[in-house]
Amino acid sequence: MPDAPPRLGDLAIAVPGIDPRHSISQLGEWFLLPEYEPLLSLPLVRDGRVAGLISRYQMMQLLFRQFGRELFGRRPVHRFMKRDPVVVDADLPLEAAADQILASMTFPVTEDFIIVRDGRYLGVGTVIGLLQALQRQLSARSRQLARALRELRTSQTQLVQSEKMASLGQMVAGLAHEMNTPLGYVSANVELAEQFFGEAHRLNEAVFAFLDLVLAPRVEAEAFDQALARLVRLRQHCDPAGQAVDLARLFSDTRFGLGEIDKLVRGLQDFSRLDRAGDEAVDIHHCLDAALLLANHLLKDRIRVVRDYAEVPPVPCRPSEINQVLLNLIVNAAQAMRTGGVLRLSTGRHADGVCVRVTDNGAGIPAHLLPRIFDPFFTTKPPGEGTGLGLSISHRIVERHGGRIQVRSDPDRGTTFTLTLPAGPAAGAPSGPDTLSLTRRIP
């Protein structure tokens, strides 16, 4: 049974309504209570019905002007309240409520909206809360659409293109997995920094309010004592020196996390090279490293990667297509080593150009299946784990580049895929026999 669509009432902050007969000074004290801290305005309610609201901004205009507290402090709130606040029924669907609220709001936003049910006050809703709920709903729908799109692709007759899109989906899933950790602590650091700045802002407000009283020609002793007491109270809970150290550490951690995310995004950009889809001379090691970065979620903590890179000339190719081939080979190797193992990536000169070997020590492929592994739709994976098109597409890409791809496998010992591509001219590049050079290149 599908989930019921979200309603506006789900966002209601159940805070008590305030009687509009309270004075402005009393209302100022209400604004300082913790339960009202997230709100831009206070609901004014009488006999369960909404009478109006008054915003923090309006209160500041009344009380922070010269002699504001003396002139307006004792007057009842209903003389200054907004009598036609945005009032929305709690049972409205979220999108319909959002249309009504956003159509009634003015910018900049200085007040919240009030949620009622059957005309009676239920609670307060914030614009931020509404936008967050809409974002969650949009994300859920996006996920549903993504799932529907993936299901549609599996039913299309153009399965070769579907396989390519599945590979991209796998890369995005891997990147999302890799980004989750740095995003998590960047988000946590931002929340902590926001709290620090909130405390500093409240202390700053109290300082300026106290200075206004000090500089005023006349001030009541009670107002002076209240402002001073508030300033002292906030100062006791605020440690600027300690917070500066904490903020420096938070910013350092955040920069590191953003650097990790930047590395992943640049790796994806380097892998796809959609802005350079034509043939160009590329370093095959960059292609290998980009494919490794995107497959890292399948390798880390389980598979040890060994790079044996030799000095090789550039390879004229379409980088995005060769990257796809290398990613397919690395992913297949990782899946063959279900309990862990060693993945060895080797490069070297070949009589026909550049040679790349991807070797695993996994389960291997039975000899009677080897002649079929490049056939379309053939797969040794369990149902639902592959379409049988990855190696077929890779074979076609390599042939289109004038190269070849070969496989050697021993059951229970592992598999080696050998990719040979024509090389471009490289001054002084060494030539050698039809074998790989094992000269190690330090990354």
Image (cartoon, rainbow, N blue to C red):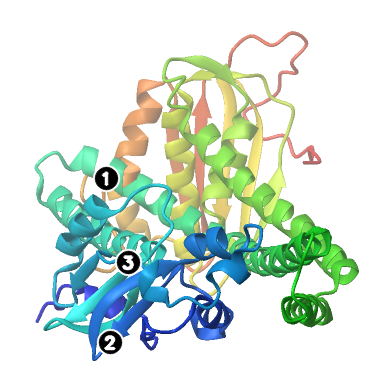
Mark 3 surroundings within 10 Å by alpha-carbon count, few (fewer than 14), some (14 through 19), many (20 or more): many
Mark in the foreground, 2 or 1: 2
Which residue in the rendered view is the most extreme toward the right?
241
Question: Is 18 located above or below residue 254 in the figure?
Answer: below
Mark in the foreground, 2 or 3: 2
Residue under label 2: 46
The circle on residue 133 is: 3
| Depth check, front residue: 262 or 215 | 215
Amino acid type indicated by mark 1: Glu
Location of the N terminus by quadrant is bottom left
Q: Is residue 58 left or right of residue 372?
A: right
Q: Quadrant of residue 406?
A: top left
Amino acid type indicated by mark 3: Ala
Q: Secondary structure at mark 1?
A: helix
Residue at 74% across / 82% down in the picture? 222
Q: Position of residue 144 (x, y in %)?
A: 21, 61
Amino acid type indicated by mark 2: Arg
